[in-house]
Amino acid sequence: MIFGFIGIILGVIISIITFYIVRRTFEYKSFIDKDVLRTGLFTKGFEAINSSQWDDAISYFKQALKIAVTKDKITVFNQIARCYYHKKDYEEALKNLSIALGIVKTLKNKNAENGILSNIGLIYFAKGDFLSAIEQYNKIIDSDIKNPNIFYSRGVSYMKLNEYDKAIMDFSKAIELNPKYTDAFINRGSTYGIMKEYNKSINDFTKAIELNPHNADTYFMRGTVYIDMEKYDLAICDFNKAIELKPRDSSSYYNRGTTYIEKHEDDLAIADFNKAIELNPKFAKAYHNRGYAYGNKQEYDRAIEDYSKAIELNPQSASSYNNRGDIYLKKLKIEEATIDIKKALELDSKLAVAMVSMGEIYQIKNDSKSARHWFEKALENKNQLSEDQIKEVQQLLKELENK
C-alpha cells in the first residue's frame, strides 16, 4: 500500500526576515568654495553620479581635490566614497571616509563628524560587518540621541545579527522620535513576525499602510504574516492589493498561489503560479509549488515535469527531489522514487518527509525492519512535521507492529 504522505510546499518567497534595508544615502553638507565651483568639476561630478557613471565621477572629484580648500575636501572625499560604495568597492569607500573623518575632527564640527560616521556605518552594513556598523551608530548616539535615522539603522543591524529584542528597542525609539517613520514600523513589524508575535506584527504593518497606503511591499509582508496565522482569506486580500499596486511582481502571485494551496483551491493556485512563472521564468519555487498543486489534482506527469524544472533551476533543492520521488512512488515507479529520495537525503540528511518516503519505499519492498528504521528516524526530527503528519507516521509504525 502506498501512503499519501504530504510532500513539502515551499514557503513564501519573501519571508518576514526580508526586511527593508537602510533607506539612507550618503550625507554631505558643506559650502563649496566659489573657485572650485568655477571649474565645473563639482557640477560634472554630480552629473556623473546622477547618471551612475561612477568612474567618471571619481575622476572629476579627484581633480577637484587638487584645488579644494580644507573644508571642501570633506565633501569631495565623501562623494568619492559614495561612488566606491555604488561600485561595491567598500575598502576604497572606507579609506576615503576615514580621510574625511580625520579632516572633520580638526574642524570640531560634530554634526559633520556624525554624518561621516553614519556613512561609515552604511559601508560596514553593506559589507555584512554589522558589529562594526553598530559601533559607528553608537558613537553618533553618544552625542545625538534625537536622530531617529541612527536608531533605525542600528535596529536593522541588530536585526541582521538576530538580536531581535535590541532591534525592537531601536525601532521603537525611532518611532518615538518620528511617529510617522514608516520604515521603522515596517521593520519592527518584520521583527515581531520573526519572533512569532503576530498580532504586534500585524499592528505595525497596518500602521505603516495607514502612513503609506501605496506601498505594495507592506501589503505583501502583512499577507505573509496572515499566512503564518492561518488567516488565509486576509492573506489573499493583502496579496490582491499588492498585485494591484505592483502587477509585475512575481512574488505576490507566488504567495497568493501558496495561500490557495493551503485553502485546497489548486486550480486558483496553478493560475497564480503560471503568472509568477510568466513574469519570472527562472522562478524555481513557483515550478515546485505548481508541481505540488498538480500532485494534489493527481496530474502526476505534470507534477513530475514541474519538479524536474525546479531541480534544473535549483539542483540543491532537497524538497524538489523529495516531492518528485513522492510522485514516482504514487506511480509505483519504485526505482525512480528511490533515486530521488536518496538524493533528497544526500542534500538534507535531516529532511523528515524524505525519511517517511524512504520508509514507504521499504514498506512496499516488504522490508519491515528498514521501514521501521526510517519512520522512527522521521519522528526523531518531528519538529519539521505537522501534527497530522506525526500521527500518520505513528499509524504507519503501528501497522508494521501488527504484521
Image (cartoon, rainbow, N blue to C red):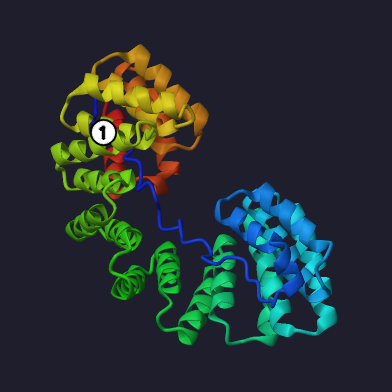
Q: Is residue 146 above or below residue 205?
A: below
Specify whether residue 211 is in view. yes
**Quadrant of the rendered structure where residue 101 is?**
bottom right
Specify whether 164 is left or right of 234.
right
Of residue 269 and residue 400, the one placed in the foreground of this image is: 269
Judged left or right of residue 89, residue 201 is: left
Q: Quadrant of residue 26?
A: bottom right
Q: Position of residue 52 (x, y in %)?
A: 58, 50
- Give the structural element (helix, strand or loop) at label 1: helix
Q: Nearer the viewer, residue 321 or 158?
A: 158
Label 1 Cα neighbours within 10 Å, binned few <14 / some 14-19 / many ≥20: many
The residue lying at 75 percent from left, 64 percent from top is 77
**Three-letter residue code for mark 1:** Arg
Residue positioned 66% across, 67% down in the render? 119
Q: Where residue 207 sits in the image (x, y, percent)?
A: 32, 75
Residue with the most extreme front position: 38
> In terms of depth relative to the viewer, which is nearer, 268 or 397?
268
* 162 sits to left or right of 259: right
Task: Please say if 248 is above or below 73.
Answer: above
Residue carrying label 1: 290
Residue 140 in which image quadrant: bottom right
